[in-house]
Amino acid sequence: MTFASDNWAGAAPEILEAIARANDGAAPGYGGDELTKKVEARFCDIFEKDCRVFFVATGGAANGLALSVLSPPYGMILAHEQSHVQMDECAGPEFFTGGAKILPVAGFGGKLTPDAVSKALAGFPERPPHGAPASCLSLTQGTECGTVYSASELTALCATAHDAGLSVHLDGARFANAVAAIGAAPADLSWRAGIDVLCFGGTKNGCIAAEAVVFFDPAKAADFDFRRKRAGHLWSKMRFIAAQFDGYFENGLWLDLAAHANAMAKKLSAGLAAINGVKVSYPTEINEVFAVFPAGVAERLRDQGHIFYPWITPGDPAGGKMQRLICSFRTTDEDVASFVDLVKRG
Amino acid sequence: MTFASDNWAGAAPEILEAIARANDGAAPGYGGDELTKKVEARFCDIFEKDCRVFFVATGGAANGLALSVLSPPYGMILAHEQSHVQMDECAGPEFFTGGAKILPVAGFGGKLTPDAVSKALAGFPERPPHGAPASCLSLTQGTECGTVYSASELTALCATAHDAGLSVHLDGARFANAVAAIGAAPADLSWRAGIDVLCFGGTKNGCIAAEAVVFFDPAKAADFDFRRKRAGHLWSKMRFIAAQFDGYFENGLWLDLAAHANAMAKKLSAGLAAINGVKVSYPTEINEVFAVFPAGVAERLRDQGHIFYPWITPGDPAGGKMQRLICSFRTTDEDVASFVDLVKRG
Amino acid sequence: MTFASDNWAGAAPEILEAIARANDGAAPGYGGDELTKKVEARFCDIFEKDCRVFFVATGGAANGLALSVLSPPYGMILAHEQSHVQMDECAGPEFFTGGAKILPVAGFGGKLTPDAVSKALAGFPERPPHGAPASCLSLTQGTECGTVYSASELTALCATAHDAGLSVHLDGARFANAVAAIGAAPADLSWRAGIDVLCFGGTKNGCIAAEAVVFFDPAKAADFDFRRKRAGHLWSKMRFIAAQFDGYFENGLWLDLAAHANAMAKKLSAGLAAINGVKVSYPTEINEVFAVFPAGVAERLRDQGHIFYPWITPGDPAGGKMQRLICSFRTTDEDVASFVDLVKRG
Amino acid sequence: MTFASDNWAGAAPEILEAIARANDGAAPGYGGDELTKKVEARFCDIFEKDCRVFFVATGGAANGLALSVLSPPYGMILAHEQSHVQMDECAGPEFFTGGAKILPVAGFGGKLTPDAVSKALAGFPERPPHGAPASCLSLTQGTECGTVYSASELTALCATAHDAGLSVHLDGARFANAVAAIGAAPADLSWRAGIDVLCFGGTKNGCIAAEAVVFFDPAKAADFDFRRKRAGHLWSKMRFIAAQFDGYFENGLWLDLAAHANAMAKKLSAGLAAINGVKVSYPTEINEVFAVFPAGVAERLRDQGHIFYPWITPGDPAGGKMQRLICSFRTTDEDVASFVDLVKRG
């Protein structure tokens, strides 16, 4: 069994069908086609707002390009010390922004608090031009620890950021999982809470390679097109990203896939938590479970061919003993039950 | 009818089938899957050499990342003044390299000559550390003007570059068209001629988004993985680029598609050249035709809904009157005949 | 004798005296001192305009930082193919701008014309986001070939640039020489002609290390302070650059030094031009002479220990045979007479 | 009185004299002069090692350029969370390196420990190419908190770094103060301890603008010249930085100036520590004193025109109430006694 990552799961069949449907005849390149326009409009519907939407193929591209708009090259971006932008993009945000600094901030379960943000800012008093001026707060929803921010938590964080003159970026690689988990409107978890730019992920949740950078303030998007192009992230055959989102949104597929993955993780988490000697490290709110197993168990399971990663992070609350288990739209009840059983057997 | 660009053509059915085939069960992310390894090996077969192969989704990414390996951030890259890296990537190579300079060099039909390269270098005498040191020669095969370099032309250019201490990058967005046109072995048009790194394109020739950066000297690829990752060009579901190449190489599809597009362009070119008042600007050696039409004809055709772009470039030999017509794997004999007929009618 | 470069000449005594005077007691760092404020105001007087002035130590820093304000990282800067920013700053503008492209443009004697600029722009038609959008025209006054632009020539060039949406940067490493040569007001050779930002040089004309970036539109300077700081170009003991300019402007020293160097070059140029077999390549309008000597003469003079550089450039009108001779505030009538005599003797 | 910063103190008279001495006749530019060569050799003597030495004008330039050699653009640099490179260079290291990430690490009194470094590295497990690979450890000697590392502390830190594959950069803006304080050989506080590159400061200790980047492994310096040039940090009249170091080293001036500043700080620290209600925050080992004054005292002193800065930092042990007082070569016994007296009076 594999709980390695949601990106191991491949694509949902509906996504492949949507791609095939889109391959009908000639269509303008670089996003000038009808399907791209239709799907951009669909985003505006879903978010109940006129927004500017740009498609790219990876979450790292979406985050880096979005941050390059929100921070000058000499700016400072605050992000969770365990966030993807800090830990998993090989200094991508620094590259895309032309050298902005990331200030890592700690917080339990992958979540920042207004207080933690305020304290981090206080430690960097404004002394222009000596310190890099704080430009942006980057949040992740659902987080890298499998937790979510409520709409009111997001609102409070955005207020703290805006009061300090920062804009707010939301890494939504698992935004669908968060929406499905919370049951709130996408708008409530984004612009109504104060988010300026959302990187809306499709890849981890059943697409092949589809991410959207959503600007809730169109003025901020003025030069995004140039930035995307020079970074090699403008697809000539753009319709094939648009098609993925077309399929993703049809009949609520995106929320169904996410809800399934979430449910599997909840079940896995509950099953593990009930085992003597297992400690679940964070609340399981989306499709990720973090847990410490009794000594030797993880190794034995790996020896048997089961796949999941040890998870070591800055400020690791588990002293290097945590395991990460991710469920996807393809995870089955049976997978979960079998795995729980295996851990129980030790 | 559209002769706007080969990227309007969508995907060949075999490519979509290969993608669907690849979507079978879980597979490791980020290129750790079996299909990626199989296709990397296929590249080694095709090029008759152990090479390091990296997949990305766009030609701009392939070129920029390759150049970032071949040039230090303070280096100078020589490229044709009409090349894609100079004209069409929105300063992408400058971005990926961290600030390398491009020195544009002129030449008829999109082609550089050893003499032109030598003269350009002579105008930039080495005066370290004042001038940006020449680091790399970037060539395109087939060129942006629809022409090709013979193996011996490439060999002479690479020798000139290597003698001056430069490495050689080949933008092969239309490499398949060149191979099909020349009928030489891929190795003869790349490493045997002295090419160090080839950006091998699939997108324009029937793939969705599939390009490969091929390092013929594995040592040069040492840090490519980090560079690709930080630029957001490492796909988590890499198997879906690999799958495209899998389909692309099967039964020689890549050469069949290219040969067809080339044949259509030859026919179109011949048809146009025979019309009184039409001047074909460059030899039509691959799937691109450049031509000047009698006054008013292009405008009338566009008014009727036919799509093709005016083509204005530095050193424009046609004074801004050139039209570009590109054929693809989807272009039909009928398309060509009808279009020639329309031009003839004026 | 040396005619190698004006930077071989060291400092004018008045500059050293001004530095010593400034070393009196404690003073705030980073430009917060009174002398810096006084000298900034002096710039406003000299240019008859409220401007924002920033001191740095080198011309490369001044140019690079100024261009980083005038061009986005994906923009295109037009500059003469022999300009310092293109030839002599080791890809510095590309570094400071974060990857902007320089498009080299040809022109006799280091000078651009509105027609050449228009043609260069025409060869790069706007096709957003494919081509790097033209952002800035960079001119040099006095030029790298020892010539000057008249006020009306500058005005025409700036109009061409502004009409196309470009701002205009002036590399004034030898601005003093141009002002002294032309006898026009500094304002007439800068903002009244349409220049947006001037890099005003002191180093080549008797200072130790003193350059000023002068923004005629204060709004453009909004983030310059951050850019200068992060590039390591904000001096903590700023008063010592200010002091140099203080001495430089006192009693018109700057124009006296420049006028002397110009006069020496005129004399040298006239002397050489009168020699049989010598060809002066460009009009000698400031302190630089470019000439072709009879075969073997340059080599013999160098063997005797005289110092001057061969000058090879793109579009070299002399086929690699040109010599560059630069006069400074320290060059004497005798130096000139002796050198002319030596060339005459062959 | 001012205890604002050592950079308020201006230049030592011997430095100005050395500059004047160097202004004798013509000399090659860009470091080709005899004085530069002589002073480079002097560095080798002082450090008892053949090293490559490069002069620049600011500490930010020295640090940024040095780090650009020690880290690839996608690398991660570990530095103290209160270090100058992290807090005071406006994201300069990110700029010079082309986007490397800084990972801030905490430690009392501005000092890192092997344990803290190891823990920070452990929180960033190697998962190429996802995490930015740790490339370099940056230390400061004497630190931004007025403390010093002993030779054995440095040795242990360098061993930790080297064992993990990192090189070690030393920000020596106050290296003279550390050498004077510890009384060890410069070699013992640099390469013998394992330091790879030292940024040796002169500016804060009586020079005008003079810093040296010292490579103990010449191979690492291979492309420094290009990097310095493109960043606008290569002086054309280099002899005037060399001259400052010439004066700085003559008769041990550098250590005399530093020892004096250190002694004044020791006295100030002892005087303050003896006052009821004053808490000295860190050991005063060089020329910087950090202290918390009784409520209202700092404000009253500032109202009276005395100048010193409040000091707020990440991980601030004093809750935002700390004051920073810096002594320089110009600080007198009387200054110190008067100030202590003023604080005592409250």
Image: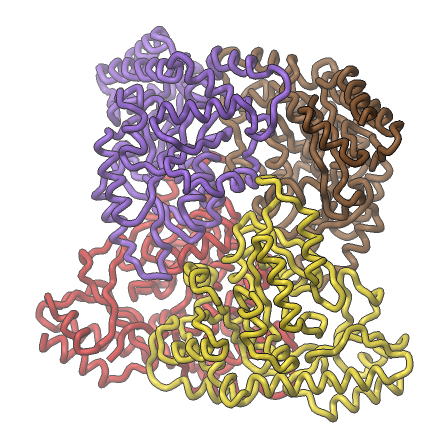
Chain colours: A brown, B purple, C red, D yellow
- Extreme residue in the top direction: B334
Occupied quadrant, residue D235:
bottom left
The residue lying toward the viewer, choosing from B264 and B242, is B242
- Judged left or right of residue A172, residue D28 is left
- Where, by quadrant of the figure, is residue D343 drawn? bottom right
Task: Tell me, yes or no, if residue C282 can be seen here.
Answer: yes
Q: Position of residue A264 (x, y in %)?
A: 79, 21
Question: Is residue C172 shown above or below A184?
Answer: below
- Locate residue A243, reporting x and y percent: 60, 18
Quadrant in which the C terminus of chain C appears: bottom left
- Check the image and report above or below for D142 versus B187: below
Quadrant holding the N terminus of chain C: bottom left
Q: Is residue D256 above or below residue A41?
A: below
- Work out whether residue B129 or residue B32 is closer to the camera in this orientation and state it: B32
Residue drawn 42% across the image and 14% down it: B250
Instruction: Find residue B275 and report its horizontal and vertical position in percent.
Output: 23, 15
D22 with respect to C272 (left or right): right
Residue C190 vs residue B125, the one in the foreground: B125
